[in-house]
Amino acid sequence: MSDKLTFTPVIGIEIHIQLKTKSKIFCSCSADYTNDEPNSHICPVCMGLPGSMPVLNRAVVRQGMLAGMALNCKVQPTTLFFRKSYYYPDLPKNYQITQSDLPIAADGWLEIKDDAGKPKTIRINRLHLEEDVGKLHHSTSDGRLEGAETSWVDYNRSGLPLAEIVSEPDVSSSREAVEFVTMLRRRVRYSGASDVDLEKGMMRFDANVSVKCSDGRWGRRVEVKNMNSFRALEHAIEYEIKRQSEILAEGGEVLQETRHWNDAKGVTSGTRVKEFYRKFIVEPDLPPLVVSPEWVEEVRATLPEMPADKASRYVKEMGLTETDAAVLTDSLDVARYFEACVAAGANPVRAGNWVRTEVLRAVNEKHVDADALAVKPESLAELILRVEDGKLSTTLARQVFDAMLEGLSLEEAVKKSGAVEGGMGGSALGDLVRATLAANPDVVEEIRSGKDAKGKKVKFLQGLVMREAKGQARPDEVASAIEESLKPE
Ligand code: ADP
Ligand code: MG
Ligand code: ZN
């Protein structure tokens, strides 16, 4: 019987994102402690000392609104903070302050493609603000609590501003999950609400997975915690779908539980510990948060055009391919660089080719944003125009670009590349053209007898001459020298 059963996964994703602010959510401790000593950015508030009072950081609210807007959420005019009580060493005050289900933003959505390539909407239940907790370090080699002789706790992370984003259970596969979080990450990064740097732990995932069996049985949802990369999210979901399907196939029952993803072993395991008793009470030390419509509109005005809108504009208005448009819009700094290059007069398709190859290569090699490159988009536009005018070959232009990357001006770089201002010119070029034509009598014959309507064969000869000239000839002079020589004697 079992080989006739099919299983449909139902998946909801919870995403924690560290919002980008100078200070923590309820105190003035610095939010940037990279490489600093443990417990060097703490105060009575984020340590949870009795008598300390939280004060909400306005910048966190703004960033939360921006992230919510980037996810098509509606900003909620009034919200409250709660105390979510639980007991653990990473949380000295024994409760976490969170907006929980009275969030700053709600009812959003993103459109992805389903596994068949059709558009599909993933609804976003809410985005709520909360504080991060401390970080435990254990003396074991794999960093796990089990078997640790000593454990330390670092409260630098306590009170960092987080946005928790909760999707509706609209995701149906691990691939959809990865596409959803990839798109979500890109949009949040565009909004400026977070750097969403996965390596720095600024984006973490939990997945709620259940499986529906074709015979009508539907397992309870299992919450898998502790994924901090796209790959971990993908593998954890796949693992859970398989595990739950096998249980249902054998006639068993899937129990509702929280499981932990072990990245090293590639498995999920029951946490054994019973879910902590969680109780919510209204946070008495924080007044309700009221966001005025004026503030919402002011924040909305700073939201840049989103990547999918940019990409379809590049396709419709500039004639780029969908693939190129997607590459160019992956991050805002690169998209802005491209747009500035076009605004400075470069042909969009040529500019797109330059940006997605040479500019992206430079950005990756130098680990900087595109706007920090020594080559400004206006200079690249000028370079592209020179190639278009035939004053520089593409090969030479690449050398010029590389020299500009090291800080030379366009003129200096052109000089350094050895490109002769006036081209090769004179008899040297004439000799080269004659030799090339003589070596390709068949091609010459075909052109002369009118069999090259599309000009492909002439292009072929030009390419040969350019290559022989080793960058010393200008494309336009080569073209006219060949044209001259091809005229019937
Ligand atoms: P809780 O308050 O226990 O966290 P929620 O209703 O907020 O419960 O849901 C938490 C997550 O579980 C959401 O991402 C949601 O999409 C997901 N979810 C709800 N029902 C299911 C289900 N049947 N299968 C898988 N995920 C589900
Ligand atoms: Mg939850
Ligand atoms: Zn503090």
Image: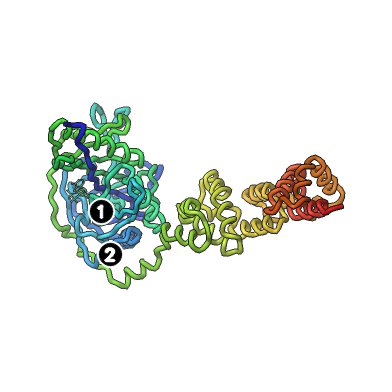
Q: Is residue 4 toward the left or the right of residue 354 in the image?
A: left
217 to 307, vertically: above or below? above
Q: Is residue 383 left or right of residue 275?
A: right
Identity of the amino acid at label 2?
Answer: Val
Mark 2 neighbour density, 10 Å: few (under 14) some (14–19) many (20 or more): many
**Which residue is at 19% across, 56% downward?**
101
Q: Which residue is mark 1?
A: 130
Q: Where does residue 161 sit, x and y in percent of width and height? A: 30, 53
The residue shown at (50%, 63%) is 317
Task: Tell whether 109 sits left or right of 374.
Answer: left
Asked whether residue 219 is in view, the answer is: no
The answer for how far apart the CA atoms under marks 1 and 2 are is 16 Å
* Quadrant hosting residue 312: bottom left
The image position of residue 137, as x and y in percent, is: 29, 35
Instruction: Indicate the position of residue 308 as horizontal and vertical percent values.
Output: 41, 57
Please name whichever residue, 138 or 486, is drawn nearer the observer in this view of the structure.
Answer: 486
* SS under mark 1: strand
